[in-house]
Amino acid sequence: MNDNAPHPLKLFNSLTRQMEEFVPVHPGEARVYTCGPTVYNYQHIGNMRAYIFADLLGRTLSWKGYKLTHIINITDVGHLTSDADAGDDKMEKAAAQSGKSAWDIAKYYTDAYWLDIDRLNIRQPAKWAIATDHVEEMIGFAKSIADKHCYELDSGLYFDVSTVPDYGRLAGAQSDDIEGRIDTVEGKRHPQDFAIWRKTPAGETRQMEWDSPWGKGAPGWHLECSQMSIKYLGETFDIHTGGIDHREIHHPNEIAQNQAHNCSEHSGANIWMHNNFLIDRAGKMSKSSGDFLRLQVLIDKGIHPLAYRLMCLQAHYRSELEFTWENLVAALTRLKRIVMGVERLLEKADGQTAPIDHPALLQLQDKFDAALSEDLNSSKCLPLLEELLTQKKLPADQRLGLLSDMDSVLGLQLSSLTRKQLRVRPASAAIDENAIEAKLDQRQKAKAEKDFATADAIRDELTAQGVDLMDGDPLRWDWKIEI
Ligand code: AMP
Ligand code: ZN
């Protein structure tokens, strides 16, 4: 355990709707399962908020000294266009629309997702569990619960939710709303019953289909997560995460299957955690909106992806977060200030870190631990990091040590990120950085010669090309291209 992190970690459990102290199933270990992307399209930045949150959780557990096993799944089959039982498989639909194979689509969007994971400095999980690699085992799982908990219809094998105790406890107050969202399927015993195996309709062939005791078909989306989480983490593991939408259908269904499979009332995970949504009032978060907001759109506007990570960390994961370009640029500015402070500190400490024993720094570290231990309150951690950067009288090497300690949780790459990397450079800008720098050299020379007319003319010329100059910084780094 990390001796410098003595505050007990408290996490909000969606199942009990209260804060609970983290007590691992296996002493010294933390086993976490995160519902991953459905790879029929790019992930939007809202989806990426879910993984930034899961990464913050994983980093916190590691920082506190637990040996972390984190699994994230890749849903490349089974997720229908509704979260329940209606519509096509998202993958098959994307394949039909694009003329590519479902397998090629899955590969393309999985790679795109992994690139974004990397750009956001989200750590690699112990395993990316890919659904189509586990179909035989999913069939085995379904077989083990079929007799007692399922019934067969023409369209598939359905789970009877009345066979497990307390179905839908996780969804709680929301369950009335959900009922309206659940799709009616001819012959279902209860509206909430769900398909764990979907048969390929007679006369059709699907690109992704497997033989099973119930005929050719594909596993249900919920079955995937139950099977893969139990396989890699055990029948009872520590934490299961996902976006708040999963609290209503996907996770209650996983819980029902876990209970059936494990012959137990336990939900499978001790703590169920859900991040709230990133919302965008301009409607650009919807994947049906054409050029929806994905990380590449931010990058094309010239915004460094870690500014988006910081924007997420500024809010508590359980709060709704509104996306606006102003909020994003404000986060970028904050990140620039932090990076400037870190650059000065790196210089002062000559890049050397030292163990922390100064009482003021120990106190800061303790406050950081307290904030983090209060259900991952990253928004409270950030001002502590900023305070550390302003404590210029304290030993620089210890400050640098504490900074990298804090950053191992926040994941902002503070010891390598440079001010230059944070300049706003839209892909569409007509002028490149070297040309800007050359103009700035000319302008500085003109100013030195008191030729203010030329200096102003250069400024106007740059402004006409969309380059905004912030005067007054001797290092001249603070220019940006209007987005
Ligand atoms: P999907 O690819 O649709 O399966 O979603 C991937 C993850 O993103 C899931 O954990 C969702 O709950 C989560 N999610 C979806 N939309 C948002 C949003 N706007 N903000 C935050 N998380 C989201
Ligand atoms: Zn899942």
Image (cartoon, helix red, strand yellow):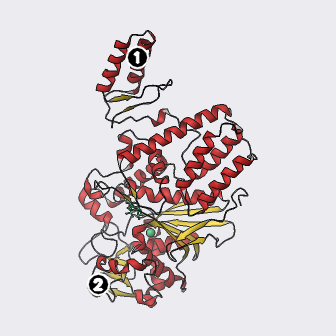
> Label 2, on which residue?
154
Residue furthest right as drawn? 357
- Identified at 42% across, 10% down, the residue is 450
Circle 2 Cα neighbour tier, 10 Å, few/some/many (<14 / 14–19 / ≥20):
few
Q: Is residue 87 above or below residue 261?
A: above
The answer to whether residue 326 of the structure is visible from this angle is: yes
Q: Depth check: give the residue in front, 276 or 367.
A: 367
Res 440 quadrant in image: top left
The x and y percentages for residue 267 are 52, 79
Q: CA distance from mark 1 to mark 2?
A: 76 Å
- Identified at 43% across, 63% down, the residue is 276
The x and y percentages for residue 344 are 60, 33
> Label 1, on which residue?
443
Q: Is residue 45 above or below residue 340?
A: below
Q: Is residue 110 above or below residue 385?
A: below
Report the amino acid beneath label 2: Asp
Q: In the image, is 258 to the left or to the right of 353?
A: left
Instruction: Tell me the SS state at disc 1.
Output: helix
Q: In the image, is 309 to the left or to the right of 365?
A: left
